[in-house]
Image (cartoon, rainbow, N blue to C red):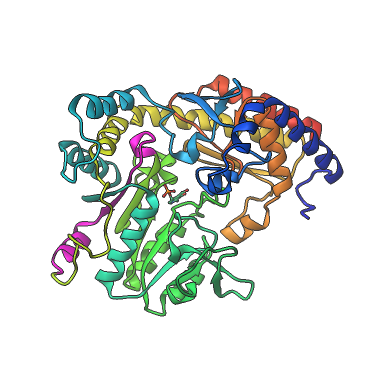
């Protein structure tokens, strides 16, 4: 049991028990919906929806902007925002209009033919992220899978390198961590690996250039697949010089670099890549860029695109492993065009980042007031607190600071008072619709939780 989060465990246990009771009492309709879902595997549409702190999830009634209402009639300020899928806010009007126009007026949800919107979206992604050629998927997981396949093909090398405790979706090659002996090993709980992950992958800690070089020196790594800042094991920010060092080393060892911007897009309109002047060979993204409508995308450098197109032996058109019948469909493309031109604009990001700074400042002040050994990190529009100070420097350190009991307590306490955080950690994301009043409301409830805890 963790002992260093700075809270009294007995008090935490008793408060958690109380809050779970309050949650159960407040949500009879959600509880009944969960209890009656006899034909859903795990009672939920996706098994990860069982990752909630109170025994069953709240069921969504309505969602608009930064607000969500459950079927029991409670309203929430939603800082989870679909774990980034709804970073544009729920059902932003321009996206609703574009999707309605496409579906209801023009017609054609999926056609196996391009629409003009696709070229527009490709050009806009190129402008924002600096990579000239784009292709689409329906999820960021698939964007990563396809990028990995292309880079193995073009490099002739078998392995992918990732950071320990990364998350890039359910990409088999990414489920590897640095073990206690310093060598790569399968991530705990990995479901149905096709082979021992050390056959397909190498791993290095985030912020560890020496470890990265040691692994790249084997000469068998096709690509490094990484987030410019870790976001799925808490936010772990890059130390000065780290990302430049990654680029230098990948170039030196002939390894391609994929920046997965699915979450780090929060850093600005062109993600961390534009904000920090990064030069990946491939950039993958998904979630937010179509305002919540399913999408994934990957951008390729000109040199890489030329090398791939010139390879007559690669079947890029038929059965060659880069599939997705519904990818690039007219609805995704219309939604992405509207999101990028009218919702997640430069001005919107400026406001979101300012709101996030207010969120981070307020949380830091409360942590200081209560003298808790916790820290806060901000990545543009995304903020997260960790039960450790100083902040963890890599994924393994961050995983070691986990305190599931404390985290669950805070999530249920906040949910009982109308605040939603992402269920997987203490992440709060700002949409263009999130207001300072929403942030103040979080701080009020968070302050009350800390007062009861300490
Ligand atoms: C960095 C990163 N990449 C990829 C994914 C996978 O996204 P999706 O579940 O939409 O496929 C995630 C999901 O959280 C992610 O955080």
Query: In the image, is 378 to the left or to the right of 108?
Result: right
Q: Residue at x 25, y 55 (%)?
A: 300
Q: Residue at x 59, y 20 (%)?
A: 73
Query: In the image, is 378 to the left or to the right of 443?
Result: left
Q: Look at the image and tell me in which quarter the C terminus lies.
A: top right
Query: In the image, is 151 to the left or to the right of 162?
Result: left
Q: Residue at x 32, y 75 (%)?
A: 157
Whether residue 23 is in magenta: the answer is no
45 or 115, nearer to the observer: 45
User: Hey, which quadrant is residue 246 in on the image?
Assistant: bottom left
Q: Which residues are magenta?
A: 288-311
- Please determine whether, in this image, residue 407 is positioned above or below residue 166: above
> Disc count in the image?
0
- Please determine whether, in this image, residue 230 is positioned above or below residue 340: below
Q: Residue at x 58, y 56 (%)?
A: 393
Q: Is residue 174 visible?
A: yes
Residue 91 position within the rendered picture, expressed as x and y whole percent measured from the top left: 40, 26
Query: In the image, is 399 to the left or to the right of 140?
Result: right
Query: Looking at the image, which residue sits at the far right?
Result: 10
Q: Look at the image and tell me in which quarter the N terminus lies.
A: bottom right
Residue 94 position within the rendered picture, expressed as x and y whole percent measured from the top left: 31, 24
Q: Is residue 277 visible?
A: no
Residue 99 position within the rendered picture, expressed as x and y whole percent measured from the top left: 28, 29
């Amino acid at each position: 049991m963790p002992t260093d989060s700075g809270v009294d465990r007995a008090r935490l246990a008793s408060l958690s028990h109380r809050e779970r009771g309050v949650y159960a009492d407040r949500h009879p309709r959600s509880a009944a919906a969960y209890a009656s879902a006899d034909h859903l595997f795990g009672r939920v549409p996706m098994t990860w929806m069982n990752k909630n702190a109170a025994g069953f999830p709240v069921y969504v009634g309505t969602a608009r902007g930064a607000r969500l209402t459950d079927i029991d009639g409670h309203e929430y300020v939603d800082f989870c925002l679909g774990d980034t899928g709804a970073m544009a806010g729920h059902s932003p009007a321009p996206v609703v209009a574009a999707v309605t126009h496409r579906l209801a007026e023009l017609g054609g949800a999926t056609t196996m033919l391009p629409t003009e919107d696709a070229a527009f979206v490709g050009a806009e992604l190129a402008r924002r992220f600096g990579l000239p050629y784009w292709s689409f998927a329906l999820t960021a997981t698939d964007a990563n899978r396809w990028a990995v396949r292309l880079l193995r093909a073009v490099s002739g090398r078998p392995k992918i390198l990732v950071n320990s405790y990364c998350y890039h979706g359910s990409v088999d090659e990414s489920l590897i961590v640095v073990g206690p002996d310093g060598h790569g090993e399968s991530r705990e709980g990995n479901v149905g690996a096709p082979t021992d992950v050390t056959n397909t992958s190498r791993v290095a800690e985030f912020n560890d250039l020496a470890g990265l070089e040691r692994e790249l020196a084997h000469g068998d790594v096709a690509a490094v697949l990484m987030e410019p800042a870790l976001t799925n094991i808490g936010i772990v920010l890059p130390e000065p010089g780290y990302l430049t060092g990654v680029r230098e080393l990948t170039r030196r060892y002939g390894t391609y670099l994929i920046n997965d911007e699915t979450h780090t897009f929060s850093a600005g309109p062109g993600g961390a890549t534009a904000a920090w002047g990064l030069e990946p060979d491939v950039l993958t993204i998904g979630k937010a860029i179509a305002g919540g409508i399913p999408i994934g995308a990957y951008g390729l450098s000109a040199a890489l695109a030329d090398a791939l197109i010139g390879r007559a032996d690669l079947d890029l058109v038929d059965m060659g492993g880069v599939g997705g019948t519904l990818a690039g469909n007219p609805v995704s493309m219309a939604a992405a065009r509207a999101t990028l031109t009218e919702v997640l604009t430069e001005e919107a990001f400026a406001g979101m980042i300012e709101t996030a700074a207010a969120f981070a400042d307020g949380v830091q002040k409360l942590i200081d007031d209560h003298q808790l050994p916790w820290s806060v990190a901000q990545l543009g529009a995304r903020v997260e607190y960790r039960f450790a100070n100083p902040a963890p420097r890599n994924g393994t350190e961050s995983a070691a600071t986990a305190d599931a009991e404390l985290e669950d307590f805070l999530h249920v306490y906040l949910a009982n008072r109308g605040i939603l955080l992402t269920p997987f950690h203490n992440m709060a994301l700002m949409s263009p619709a999130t207001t300072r009043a929403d942030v103040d409301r979080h701080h009020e409830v968070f302050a009350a939780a800390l007062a009861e805890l300490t």
